[in-house]
Structure formats: structure tokens, C-alpha cells
Image (tube, rainbow, N blue to C red):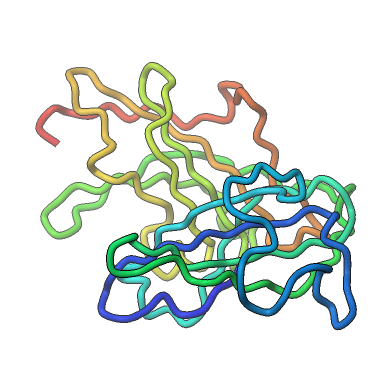
Amino acid sequence: MRSGSAGAGGAYGAWSGRAACPAGRRAEGGRPHGSAGTGESPLGRGDGHRGWYEEEVVRYGGTGSDVEVITWNIVPKLEANGYYYFTVAAVGDGVQYADSPYVVSDVFEYTGEEAPPLAAPTGLAWRLYEIDDARRYYATWDNLDDYEDDDFFNVTFYDQAGDYLMNNTWSKREIVERGYGGIPIRAEFLPRESGGACRFTVQVYSSRPNQYASSPMPDPAPEEYYSPWLQIRAEE
């Protein structure tokens, strides 16, 4: 999913992205039937229509506000060969701004139903950095060089009870540009109770879906998909 500039001034914005299933057939001029270049989404939010394959709301801003083009991977896999498209709207705060109209993408022909998966990340490990007088813990793996710049990594963090803490999704390009070799867990999600611990899994979302599928991620994930435990001291 690609959208325009995130805006200026360091503010955060949110985008609602929706990927349509092969029911979005190619129309004259390359657009799906029943859609236009801008305007209302072909299907309203929350309508439960099976024509929508996936929907995701993305909060993006801060240091990323001046990025001219945002690339976002909204689904790890499209299950059937066919034609797909997506729509994007900026989500208003309901006070100063309402939601923007939806913009409809061009059509993508997906032929990768039988494509082999990307290799799973290996050598999962925690890396600690001191940044602005604060400890920052990064999820890392040892085969980052095996992937393309536009492949995305979805890191999901879990506490000692196996409960979900948060997830963070960055492209390889973002990881390399930021220079820490991995993806951080935000400090407010660290389990700080006595003896608290957390660990993570990593799935790679393919940027070349017609050549490679995303790396496997069983549900539930077996032990070999998890990183070692990170033990958190109460004072951190």
C-alpha cells in the first residue's frame, strides 16, 4: 500500500487501508468496476462485505512526517490468483477534521498463489542500545541481508504468559537507515513487574508476491519461531 506525504510539522496521521479480493474485477481503463479515482470507498467501513480482503488503520508521523511516499504492507498473503486493488483514506480526529475521501489504486494482477515462501528470519536475538539516556531494546536477526529493501518485517512481542504486548512493522530499508539492525519494542510495553520477561517472533512480508510468498508463521507459533527471553529489571 502506498500513499502520499504524511504531512508536515511532526504531527501524526492515520490512514485506513483496505485491500479488495478478486471480486474487484478489472474495468475499462484499469480500475475496478464500481470505483472511481477519488470519493467514497466502494464499500463502507464496517459493512462486513466479503469483497474486502483486509482492512488496517495505520498511525504514522513523527520523524516520518516528511516522507514523500509511504509504503505499507497490509496483508502477508493474497490467497487466490486474481486482480486486487486497495483504497486509502486519511482518518480525521472527529473534532477538527473528518475522514478524507477514499482514493482508489490501480489494479494489481496477482499470480503468486503457488510462489515459494521467503526464508524465515534466523538467529533471533535482543540488542540493547543507550539512546538519549534511555535503554532501548531491539529485536534483531542474523540474516537481514537475505531480503530486499522493500520486504517488511512484522515483529510481534509477547509477555511471559504468552499474551500479546505489541507489534511493529518496518521495511528492511527503514531498519538499515535507522542504523540499529532491528525493530524496537516501545518502552511502555516492557513488562516491568518483578521477574517480567518478553520475547518476539518475526515474519517477513514479501515485496515480490508473484515471485515469493511471505515467510511462514504458524498459528500458534512453535517454540523454534521465538526469540530468547529478555528479562526486564524493575528499574528499567
Identify the residue at image location x=23%, y=40%: 188
Image x and y of residue 216, in percent: 70, 38
* Residue at screen point 43% across, 53% down: 182
* Coordinates of residue 138 in the picture (x, y in percent): 36, 47
Residue 103, image x, y percentages: 61, 73
Which residue occupies the foreground of this view, 54 or 185?
A: 54
In the rendered image, is residue 102 in sight? Answer: yes
Q: For this view, does 108 lie left or right of residue 214?
A: right
Of residues 19 and 35, the one nearer the viewer is: 35
Q: Considering the image in quadrants, where does the N terminus appear?
A: bottom right
Q: Quadrant of the C terminus?
A: top left
Q: Residue at x 22, y 18 (%)?
A: 195
Image side of residue 164 versus residue 44, left or right: left
Which residue occupies the foreground of this view, 194 or 108? 108
Relative to 163, residue 186 above or below: below
Among the 4 quarters of the image, the one containing residue 95: bottom left
| Residue 151 vertical placement versus 66 (above, below) | above
Nearer the observer, 91 or 111? 91
Q: Is residue 144 left or right of residue 195?
A: right
Q: Is residue 203 left or right of residue 108?
A: left
